Each structure stands twice: as structure tokens, then as C-alpha cells.
Amino acid sequence: MHEITCLLDKDFITAVPTGEAQYPEGQRFRATTAGKEALQAWLASPYTPAPRVEDTDIQLRLMAASVLDQFTALSLLEIEVGFRQAQLDYIERGAAAAAARRPTDHTDPEWCFTVLRDYHASTLRRWLDLLNQLHARLTTRENEDPAG
């Protein structure tokens, strides 16, 4: 609840009681104009991918931008996909070079590194698949006729 209290204190959100009998203390939160402006400013701020895959910053940015600003979401996706694809390419080049000298002794540190590299590559591939699926959804939504 600390985060919600901070948002309330900064006047970024307001709390409205739900009035539901089964949740007498329940509240719904709505973004204020100041909150929407702060969110838009954050989305417009420069994005630099974190070394870690599936970083919370990109997840939150994509979630907010997918709803509020499709152009920003697509731009973020392009940055993130480019960065992660470069990471994967680097790992795969190293894996190809190591394949020729792959040790048979599973206690060898090189073998452990190979296992970690393979795990990281599979994590990157999964993340890239999710990013590409989101890109396809946003692009499809962008091309849909609102008049239907």
C-alpha cells in the first residue's frame, strides 16, 4: 500500500469508495490530470534497455503505452527487440564457437558456462517471441477500422 499512498500524496490518483456491501472498505482509484501528465512524461522519457531480460521498467512502460499511446508502445518495442536480438546474436555466435570444443566432462567450468549460455539464449528467445506477439497485436489494432 506504500505505493498507493505515495500516488495519493502526490495527487496522481484519487480514491473513491466502491460502496459494495461485501467490500465495505473497498476503493477504486482513478488517475488525476496530474497523474496522467506524469505518466505521459515518463512514457516520453528516453528508454535504455536494462541488461536483464524482462526488466520491470519495460514491462510497465509497455503495459501503459499499449493502452495510452500506441505509437510510443511500438517505438519501445522496436528498441527492446533490437537490443534483445543483438544480445541473442552475440550469445549464439559464442555458442557456435564453443560447440566445436564442447567438453565431455560435466564438471568442467566451460560446460557450466555452456549450460548458462543456453539457458540465457532460451530466455531471450521466449522474451523476443512475446515482444513480437505484442507488436503484431498493436500493429493489427493500429490498422483496424474504428468504424468497423
Image: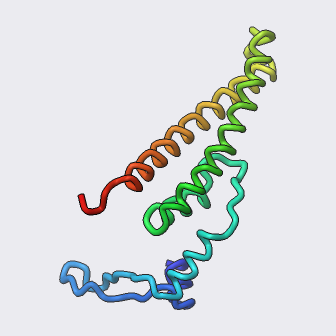
- Is 21 positioned to the left or the right of 126 in the image? left
**Residue under the point 71% across and 57% down:** 48
Residue 74 position in % (x across, y down) = 54, 55
**Residue under the point 78% across and 24% down:** 94
Identify which residue, 22 or 42, lies in the foreground: 42
Give the total of numbered labels: 0
**Above or below: residue 7 compared with residue 43:** below
Residue 133 position in % (x across, y down) = 45, 43
- Is 112 positioned to the left or the right of 39 in the image? right
Identify which residue, 130 or 116, lies in the foreground: 130
Quarter of the view holding residue 38 = bottom right
Quarter of the view holding residue 83 = top right
**Residue under the point 53% across and 59% down:** 73
Residue 10 position in % (x across, y down) = 57, 89
Identify which residue, 9 or 130, lies in the foreground: 130
Image quadrant holding the C terminus, namely: bottom left
**Above or below: residue 19 compared with residue 110:** below
Quarter of the view holding residue 103 = top right
Residue 69 position in % (x across, y down) = 49, 66
**Residue under the point 34% across and 88% down:** 16
In this picture the colour scheme is rainbow
